Image: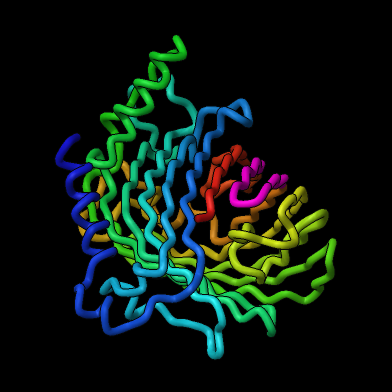
Amino acid sequence: MRSVYAFLFLISLSFGLKSQTDSIQKPLDKTNSYFSFNYDNDFFSATDRYYTQGVYLEYIAPFLRNSIPARILPKLKHSNQNYYGIIAEQDCFTPGSIRYDTLNYLDRPYAATMYVSQVLYSINEQKKMRLNSRTDIGMIGPCAICEDEQKAIHRSLVNIQPLGWENQLSTDLFLNYGIGLEKGIVNTKYFETILNSYARFGTAYNDISAGIMVRGGLMAGYFKQLGIIKNAVRNKFQLYAFAKGKVRAVAYNAPIQGGMMSPDIHALPYSSVKPLVLQGTYGIVFAYKQFSAEYTKVYQSTEFLNGRDHGWGHCNITFCF
């Protein structure tokens, strides 16, 4: 376990550090810094299956533009805000039931992923556009320690122990690139409508998606920084609701089909993967000055044949400094 954390720590250092010379020669952006904690769990939907838990930490700071992966992340033309960040993420997946220790070839397998990402949010406030891009590197398999984590959580809650983790997908490489564009079509003081599209390519996910988001309430503009603003004169207090819907066209899903580098007897074939997946989300956000908290519910159509629709809850806490 210690070797896994050491591996992630070294990768995150390589993302954040390039050279002191570069930092001296290039003036840093005058954008704010952010730290965000995010937690997903289907406990909030009273289930224990499929995408059962996800945890990720995000740190955004101007100096991260000097990292090596940042070179391949595109910016919008005439963008007036560019936010560079790193993310450390772990996602855990289980079959439809955790009560069986035998392999069910019709159900999705146990799977675990852990990776770090370089991200860039490039915003053109005048044109109401935002370009989101990222590079991901990590591993799929037992090294992501989802088995130990889920069993520890169940023990602490005096719940049944999950059976069958010995059948999880084997170790493989997680290497991905993602890019998406958001465009505001209705932008008023109390209501916004935003169209979005996103594409992912790599050894873990290959898919494209398109959707729409609406927001309403007391809020800062979506294209005004990243939601909360340090030393804001207006929008110190925010309280608003939002809803999102999207459709995703799937070509490859490694947590279901296994990694690309080696065959896996526990994986489902591509013929079992649903080519189209629908997802709906709604939530509420409270923010005051440099702090925000969010709670969201997500509902998703089945990702594979013989599967069921699924839902989970998402919590987010963010500090701006």
Outermost residue toward the bottom?
Answer: 77
Residue at (54, 41) in percent of width and height: 306
Residue 318 appears in view: yes
285 falls in the magenta region: yes
What colour-coding does the image apply? Answer: rainbow
Could you say which is closer to the camera, residue 46 or residue 270?
Answer: 46
7 falls in the magenta region: no
In this image, 172 relative to 192: left or right? left
Span of residues in magenta = 283-297
In this image, 128 relative to 25: left or right? right
Residue at (26, 74) in percent of width and height: 68
Q: Main secondary structure of the magenta part?
A: strand
Residue at (49, 40) in percent of width and height: 51
Could you say which is closer to the camera, residue 296 or residue 189?
Answer: 189
Quadrant of the snapshot with the N terminus: top left
Where 147 falls versus 249 (above or below)? above
Could you say which is closer to the camera, residue 45 or residue 34?
Answer: 34
Residue at (62, 39) in percent of width and height: 311
Residue 106 appears in view: no
Where 212 falls versus 319 (above or below)? below
Q: How many marks?
A: 0
Where 268 falls versus 16 (above or below)? above
Tell me residue 280's x, y (percent): 69, 51
Tell me residue 263's x, y (percent): 23, 53
Tell me residue 45's x, y (percent): 63, 31
Tell me residue 184's x, y (percent): 72, 75
Where 131 falls versus 190 (above or below)? below
In this image, 305 relative to 242: left or right? left
Identify the image quadrant of residue 143: top left
Outermost residue toward the left?
Answer: 3
In this image, 71 relative to 198: left or right? left
